[in-house]
């Protein structure tokens, strides 16, 4: 196993030529904000709960589930594997009927890390080959640690030549059973390798004991989320030793569960209050959560915002002045694009650290952010594990997004202050937040007390 993050294609290699997409004109904030924005369900919770529901020993229900490209890819893949998934009266209610997992099927992962990482261990429980492939950008995302761990417990995984694959595409040869036992995993490139194996571990004959053998482990809240969702489904998990997780073999209980709003998707809307001045509120904010977005109030406060949680409404107010800061985002890498652009609008230099693993996200986010902030006249330099951003006056232009939803939402944040920012392929936000651009425009158009949400 390797701890190195395989290189993404250079950003320019995956970017659409400028002439083909003039981009969405990001609106300026012309007055202080006063908006309430309802964000849909969490991607990370929806896709974990779908997997557990398909592995459960009876039918279950998700309420408030996310419907987006990543969630729909997960639904499509689990249906292909045999699960019954039906929509209730509203598409965010999903009734899941687990059935024997079947092989000889194809799984399209799109660009969803949760689909490409969480489903190979599930596919190993199917009764035949499961062929995985995804978007061109997905074919360079790190996969080896989860595939090598599966091989180490007897699961055959091959590429088109019958060799051992390191990336998509690949085939997991399910035999209907996985022995399980002890696995060593280097999860320094993604916490999702740990989550993937733990999620299916209770269905392995001997359960699973997973030891992380890398030097760093990003996104710990997401691993805690996996452990919490497993325990809520009655699975016994011992995480009392640092870097070791033990999942006991046993049934996964069916549940009727409500999905929390996606706090990481709330981040750009809340950030708008810092850039435009004024107030943005997000209802449905959980008092306790394993989502990394739990860190947002403290992070925004460090940049000078006022944050308060009144009941289940998080309120963030800003003045338009943003302080420079030194932020360790190791636990919450998916928030980094939002903070990178806030830093570019700050009153002094900022450093983002602990996020080397962003090089294996939807695109190489460190390279992409540095390049696009620089393209608009800013100064952003990559470090070994993050970015140093020195505010400079910015100008308009096309902000390239590299198939990355969080590049698109970050460009919208810059456009609140910088006239003439155009966001290439704003539709890429459908990965986790379909209709982002309309929600953004509604937030800016919202008067006092007006719902700005979808
Ligand atoms: O398990 C999850 O749901 C996620 C884990 C994190 O992945 P990494 O650890 O690869 O950053 C996060 O960035 C991603 O958006 C979602
Ligand atoms: C890294 C992300 O996604 P994925 O689940 O595809 O890894 C993200 O949403 O920021």
Image (tube, rainbow, N blue to C red):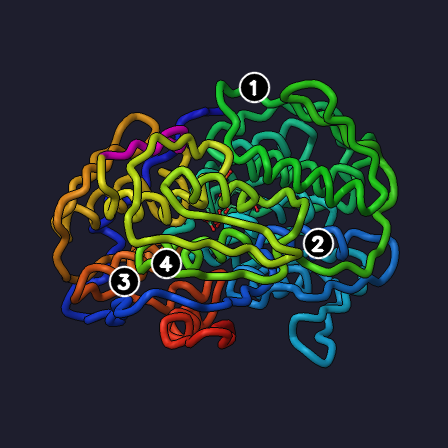
Task: Decide which of tag 2 and tag 1 comes sooner along the chain.
Answer: 2
Magenta span includes 352: yes
Between 428 and 131, the one lying in front of the other is: 428
Tell me the residue at 47%/43% (across/down). 161
Is any part of residue 289 visible from this angle?
yes
Q: Is residue 60 left or right of residue 162?
A: right
- Give how far apart the Cα atoms at labels 4 and 1 are: 39 Å
Asked which secondary structure carries label 4, the reply is helix
CA gap, disc 4 and disc 3 = 7 Å
- Numbered tag placed on residue 49 in the rendering: 2
**256 and 10: which is toward the camera:** 256
> In the rendered structure, which segment of residues is drawn in magenta?
349-356
Give residue 280's position: percent from left, percent from top: 45, 61
Give the residue at mark 4: 272
Q: Secondary structure at mark 1?
A: loop
- On whether ligand 2 comes within 8 Å of the CB at mark 4, the answer is no
Residue 32 rendering spot, x and y as whole percentages: 33, 65
* Location of mark 1 (residue): 213
Where is residue 339, by image quadrant?
Answer: top left
* Callout 4–callout 3 Cβ contact below 8 Å: yes
């Amino acid at each position: 196993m390797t701890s190195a993050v395989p290189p993404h294609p250079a950003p320019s290699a995956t970017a659409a030529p400028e002439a083909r997409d003039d981009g969405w004109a990001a609106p300026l904030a012309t007055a202080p904000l006063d908006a309430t924005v309802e964000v849909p369900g969490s991607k990370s919770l929806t896709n974990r709960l779908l997997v557990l529901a398909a592995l459960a020993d009876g039918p279950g229900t998700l309420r408030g589930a996310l419907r987006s490209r990543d969630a729909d890819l997960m639904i499509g893949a689990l249906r292909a594997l045999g699960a019954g998934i039906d929509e209730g009266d509203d598409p965010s209610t999903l009734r899941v009927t687990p059935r024997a997992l079947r092989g000889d099927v194809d799984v399209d992962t799109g660009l969803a890390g949760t689909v490409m990482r969480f489903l190979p261990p599930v596919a190993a429980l199917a009764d035949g080959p499961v062929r995985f492939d995804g978007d061109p950008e997905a074919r360079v995302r790190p996969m080896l640690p989860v595939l090598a761990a599966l091989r180490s417990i007897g699961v055959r995984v091959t590429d088109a030549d019958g060799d051992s694959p390191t990336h998509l595409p690949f085939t997991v040869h399910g035999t209907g059973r996985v022995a399980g036992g002890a696995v060593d995993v280097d999860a320094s490139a993604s916490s999702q390798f740990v989550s993937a194996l733990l999620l299916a571990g209770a269905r392995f004959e001997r359960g699973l004991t997973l030891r992380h053998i890398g030097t760093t482990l990003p996104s710990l809240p997401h691993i805690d989320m996996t452990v919490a969702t497993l325990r809520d489904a009655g699975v016994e998990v011992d995480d009392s030793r640092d870097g070791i997780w033990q999942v006991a073999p046993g049934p996964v209980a069916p549940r009727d569960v409500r999905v929390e709003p996606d706090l990481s998707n709330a981040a750009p809307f809340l950030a708008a209050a810092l850039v435009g001045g004024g107030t943005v509120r997000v209802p449905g904010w959980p008092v306790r959560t394993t989502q990394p977005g739990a860190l947002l109030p403290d992070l925004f406060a460090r940049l000078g915002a006022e944050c308060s949680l009144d009941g289940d409404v998080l309120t963030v107010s800003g003045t338009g002045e943003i302080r420079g800061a030194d932020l360790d985002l190791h636990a919450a890498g998916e928030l980094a694009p939002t903070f990178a652009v806030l830093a570019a609008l700050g009153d002094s230099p900022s450093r983002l650290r602990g996020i080397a693993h962003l090089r294996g996200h939807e695109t190489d986010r460190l390279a992409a952010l540095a390049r696009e902030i620089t393209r608009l006249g800013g100064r952003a330099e990559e470090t070994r594990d993050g970015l140093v951003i020195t505010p400079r006056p910015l100008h308009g232009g096309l902000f390239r997004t590299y198939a990355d939803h969080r590049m698109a939402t970050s460009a919208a944040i810059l456009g609140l202050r910088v006239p003439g920012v155009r966001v290439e392929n704003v539709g890429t936000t459908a990965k986790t937040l379909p209709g982002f651009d309309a929600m953004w425009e509604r937030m800016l158009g919202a008067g006092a007390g007006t719902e700005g949400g979808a």
